[in-house]
Structures are given as structure tokens and as C-alpha cells.
Image (cartoon, grey):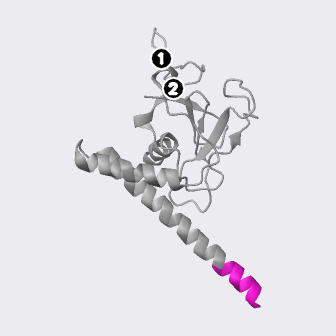
Amino acid sequence: MSDGPRRRKLGLIIGGCAALVVVALAFFLIGRSSGSPSGSNASSTTSASTQVAANASSKTSIPPKSATSVAVAPAGGGNAGKSGLEIVKAASLPPEARTTLKLIDANGPYPYSRDGVVYNNLEKILPKQSKGYYHEYTVVTPGSKDRGTRRIIAGGKGERYYTDDHYASFKEVVG
């Protein structure tokens, strides 16, 4: 093997390791900020988390989830949100999905380069919106050698949708 391919391979390995360090740091900071009591430790953790998010190169800016975007189950015991899709409480999602939701709210950094790209709703399961309205984010699947099939789709007004079967079905995330 000549020096060119060796250098390229070494560069990819070093770049991959650097990305993993950034992701691990983000997960660590998010875990500390969500579990720390209010006080000086919480504010220093929040500022460190904000610093990491600010330093990350982000392609998109998704607005934080707002109270107006939270779907409420209709009266009469139905389980459909504003979108007409079945709802799921964020607390009921797998821990990796909850971590992805926190990363979205913090605007990254994200573990995969494809996180934040436009989701075009080709399956037409989500409510119809203009192109560029939805963005997709990977939900890490433990043991998977690739991105797996789990995703969070974020809408431009803060709504969130979860799929664990690579867009074949969705649930509207509330709470």
C-alpha cells in the first residue's frame, strides 16, 4: 500500500475518533444537565453544554419544542395527536430516543453526519408540509453497525415524530 491510501485511511480513523469524542462529551454533558440539582453545578453544566453545542458545526436550526406544539389526546379515550397519528409520551421512548430529543433541543452536536438533513416525507405519513419543513435525526440503536432504523423527525414548529421501522410508521411524540 502506498503512502497516499495509508494517509487517507489514517485521516479517516483519526477523524472518526474525534467525532466519537465529541459525541461522548455531548452525551455526558446532557446526562449531567438533566440529572443535576438546581444551583451552581447546574448552571456550569448548562454553560458547558451550550458551549459544546455552539462549537459544533450545525447545518440546520430547529426551533425548541414549544407548548403550542404538544399534541393532546382527544376526549373520549382516543390516542391520536394533532397529526392524526398515534401519540407516544417522550418518557416512554427508548433512552436513546430521549437523548436524541435532547440533542435536537440543544441544536447538537449530533453523532451522525446525516443528522439534521431534510426529510421529504415521501411516504406521506406525516402531515403535508412544504419541502424543507421536516428534518431527520438518528436514534442510536445499540449493537447496530450502521444508523439502524430508528429516527426522530422534527417539524419546523417544534413537533416531533418517532419511527422505529425506518419510516414505515410514525408516532407523534408528546410531553
For residue 1, say whether it is visible.
no
State which quadrant residue 131 falls in: top right
Which amino acid lies under the numbered mark 2 shown in the image of this protein?
Answer: Ile
For the point 64% across and 48% down, which residue is it?
59
Q: Magenta span covers which residues?
A: 1-10
Majority secondary structure in the magenta region: helix
Which residue is identified by label 1? 73
Q: Is residue 64 left or right of residue 131?
A: left
- Does residue 73 lie above or below 76 as drawn? below
**Which mark is first along the chain, 2 or 1?**
1
Q: Position of residue 85 (x, y in %)?
A: 59, 24
Please name the residue that numbered disc 2 is placed on.
87
Question: Which quadrant is home to the C terminus?
Answer: top left
Disc 1 to disc 2, how far (Cα)?
7 Å
Quadrant hosting residue 25: bottom left
- Check residue 136 for magenta coloring: no
**Residue type highlighted by circle 1:** Ala
- Whether residue 123 appears in this view of the structure is yes
**Residue 111 location, quadrant:** bottom right
Q: Are marks 1 and 2 in contact (CB under 8 Å)?
A: yes
Query: Residue, x 43% and y 48% (percent of image)?
Result: 50
Label 1 element class: loop
Q: Give left or right: position of 168 versus 22.
A: right
**Element type at mark 2:** strand
Q: Position of residue 87 (x, y in %)?
A: 51, 26
Residue 133 placement (x, y as % from top left): 68, 31
Image x and y of residue 103, in percent: 49, 46
| Residue drawn at 36 percent across, 47 percent down | 46
Label 1 crowd (10 A; few <14 / some 14-19 / many >=20): some
Check the image and name the residue furthest to the top. Answer: 76
Please give the name of the residue rendered at 74% of the width and 36% of the height, measured from the top-left corner.
Answer: 120
